[in-house]
Amino acid sequence: MIAQPKASHFVDGQYLEDASGAAFDVLFPGTGEPIARLHAATPAVIDAALASATRAQAEWARRRPVERGRVLARAAQIIRDRAEALAQLETLDTGKPVQETRVADWPSGADALEFFAGLAPTITGETIPLGGDMVYTLREPLGVCVGIGAWNYPSQIACWKSAPALAMGNAMVFKPSELTPLGALQLAEILVEAGLPAGLFNVVQGAGAVGAALVTDPRVAKVSLTGSVATGQKVYAAAAAGIRAVTMELGGKSPLVIFADADMDSAVGAAMLANFYSAGQVCSNGTRVFVERAALPAFLDRLKARSEAIVMGDPRDDTTQMGPLISDAQAAKVAQYIATGHAEGARLVTGGTVQGRFVPPTVFADVTDDMTIAREEIFGPVMAVLPFDTEPEVIARANATPYGLSAGVFTRDISRAHQVIAALEAGTCWINTYNLTPVEAPFGGSKLSGVGRENGRAAIEHYSQIKSVYIGMGPVEAPF
């Protein structure tokens, strides 16, 4: 079970190794076995990546958008042609079940490349008549962009960030999480095979020090981070020192509101998807499940039965529905939250027994708003169920959080659904479903959950800038 890449980094169109960088092992979360050994980027590697990106970006920006789009479309097709091998690698890298990585990770990345490939030629400026004079606008690339990825959806995130960046004529230097570094190297290789000029998508490995060096380099025009709020605050501050553009997709403690008139089977299924998919390691998860009191007994009965039927095991097994957490440290963190839930008086409905990196679907009922498990992001398969009585009450309680990434509402009353969603303070919302994130739709949060948007046409705004050109059609009039 070896997934050793050709080298640790991908710079200027080829693999690059610098063994003087600190070595680190990549572990398969399912067993803890090492599957690869990489080296963190040295200052020389970082400089080479940024230098090649700076050089290549200028020529890339001059290309017709349709030409840039063709490269991205070819890359999307290569990903689809290699779907099974990429899914297996993603499972080794992340520990997610292969039945999940076959449909949710690289496929979403391919969709993003294809979407922005088609969108690129449609992005144009406008003309603004001013009587005799006029103004026209140009939408230009920013330059060299830095992407910093998270470990829960490493390959998808690499595609989500690189697709709009490259489509708009930028270059990108991407640093994946040191826990899941393998997929981004595959993407770099695929993009070059698809015809992307050398230097436009570089991958450098390492932890926070490497990210900090990238974020503060004067050659960098924009930073896009997916990660925790704490990391986002540090990166945002560092980027701000250089007045760099930023996109921050951070964490959350999102509400899922279920009214008594909802289709209860669908609501239970959505609550499970919003807490147990990817072993709960999803930033947009609806981990505060508010259930109208009249529906609470039926909801908990169905939820318990269905949660206990989830098949846990080796993520490489086709029948496994839920795998391990990413690391021992993450499992220990989740175990501590479960212990805190007990200590603060929440009632355990199911789960709660941590075995190594494996945490079963865990549900707490009788949760109150002030409990730790209702306030802090756990990033594991732990659901907090909270009863409510009235619509105004649940809206106020749902919004009583510093986060604002996502929210969901289940009800058959469509007027109520729209009214409640409009009142919830979150950037990405669902009605009668949860956690569907098609690349056509913008994705991102408010409050501490981030700034900017991934995906959709909205992403173009964050990887480009507008230049206004005033054209004088007559003599210049001056008062002196």
Image (spheres, helix red, strand yellow):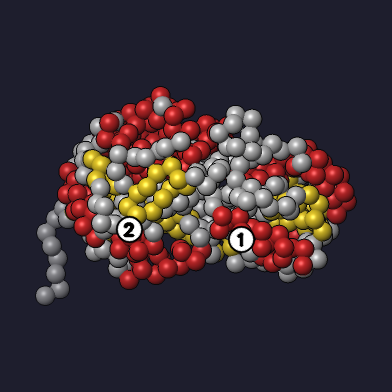
Count of numbered marks: 2
| Local crowd size for mark 1, using a 10 Å CA cut-off: few (<14), some (14–19), many (≥20) | some
In the image: residue 410, left or right of residue 220: right
For residue 95, say whether it is visible.
yes
x 45%, y 45%: residue: 34
> For the residues marked 1 and 2, what is the alpha-carbon distance in whole angstroms?
26 Å
Q: Which residue is mark 1?
A: 333
Q: Position of residue 390 (x, y in %)?
A: 81, 59
x 80%, y 55%: residue: 348
Q: For mark 1, give the secondary structure.
A: helix
- Answer whether labels 1 and 2 touch (C-beta < 8 Å): no
Q: Position of residue 276 (x, y in %)?
A: 66, 45
Q: Position of residue 118 (x, y in %)?
A: 37, 33
The quadrant of the rendering that contains the C terminus is bottom left
Q: Label 2 sits on what residue type?
A: Ala
Q: Which residue is mark 2?
A: 22
Of 203 and 251, the residue lying toward us: 203
In the image: residue 367, left or right of residue 444: right
Q: Is residue 474 above or below residue 190?
A: below
Of 113 and 51, the residue lying toward us: 51
x 47%, y 42%: residue: 93
Q: Label 1 sits on what residue type?
A: Lys
x 77%, y 63%: residue: 342
Q: Residue furthest top?
A: 81
Q: For mark 2, give the secondary structure.
A: loop
Mark 1 or mark 2: whose residue is earlier in sequence? 2
Q: Is residue 39 above or below residue 102?
A: below
